[in-house]
Amino acid sequence: MTERALLDRVSVETRAAIRAAGRQVIIPDGNFLLRDGESATAAFYVLDGLLKIVKTSPGGRVSVVGLRGTGCLVGELAHLAPAPRSSSLQAVYRTVVLRIDYPALDRLLVNHADFAHVMLEDLAVRLREATYHLHEVMTASAITRMAARLEQLADEVQPEAELSLALPVSQQELGEWAGLSRAGAVKALRILRERGVIETSRLAIVIKDLTALRTIASS
């Protein structure tokens, strides 16, 4: 998510109230914070780290459908529209979150209008992203879709001119996230390598030209 961290967009008083309302939880690398179908009792603010959103099909196939990084609030939808968890959240690497139980979340929403406003703002951003991603899957080329997913990965880990990314998802998962077959994902990555935009190894992707990547992602 490219929006500024939620805590940076509320007042000092509200920031203190949010921190006081929760308790810190550490999610080790590869562990799950939430699982699809579980009863929902709390939201979580990501203090540091990266989570991948995974969905399981009726046939048991697991697919990556998104990422949530530092500064994001997750798990609140199951409270706003009561239902079991609709997806699982897995730590890409060691991730620290602030657990906010739903009664405490309700008090924050009632007593701190700026928190309610920012939370609604972020939900609107996610809705726009989901709509754009659906349109992208239906109309964009394979290389555009792959570039868009890599751009999103870069944005989640604070990009610089040259950025080395520990690959948080496999090439197959990247392809599924972009709506591509594994073969399509491998081909798109190869084209990006040939253009000098990225370099790849078994465990990492290096973005050599972030400007070019953004141009391809928006084409």
Image (cartoon, rainbow, N blue to C red):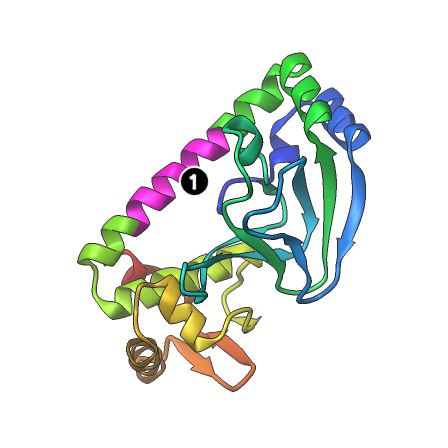
Magenta highlight range: 121-133
x, y percent for residue 178: 34, 63
Q: What main secondary structure does the magenta stretch of the protein show?
A: helix
Asked whether 150 or 206 is in front, the reply is 150
The amino acid marked with disc number 1 is Arg
The residue shown at (68%, 21%) is 108
x, y percent for residue 64: 46, 62
Above or below, 165 against 114 in this view is below
In the shown orientation, is residue 190 left or right of residue 105? Answer: left
In the shown orientation, is residue 14 left or right of residue 218? Answer: right
Above or below, 189 against 90 in this view is below
Above or below, 170 against 28 in this view is below
Asked whether 160 or 79 is in front, the reply is 79
Tell me the residue that label 1 is attached to. Answer: 126
x, y percent for residue 146: 34, 67
In the shown orientation, is residue 216 left or right of residue 173? Answer: left
* Residue 122 seen in render: yes
Residue 199 included in the magenta stretch of the image: no
Crowding at mark 1 (Cα within 10 Å: few <14, some 14-19, many 20+): few
Secondary structure of the residue carrying tag 1 is helix
Name the quadrant containing residue 208: bottom left
Above or below, 14 against 70 in this view is above
Where does the C terminus fall, quadrant-wise? bottom left
* Residue 211 seen in render: no
Name the quadrant containing residue 150: bottom left
- Residue projecting furthest to the left: 139
Asked whether 79 or 115 is in front, the reply is 79
Asked whether 170 or 19 is in front, the reply is 170
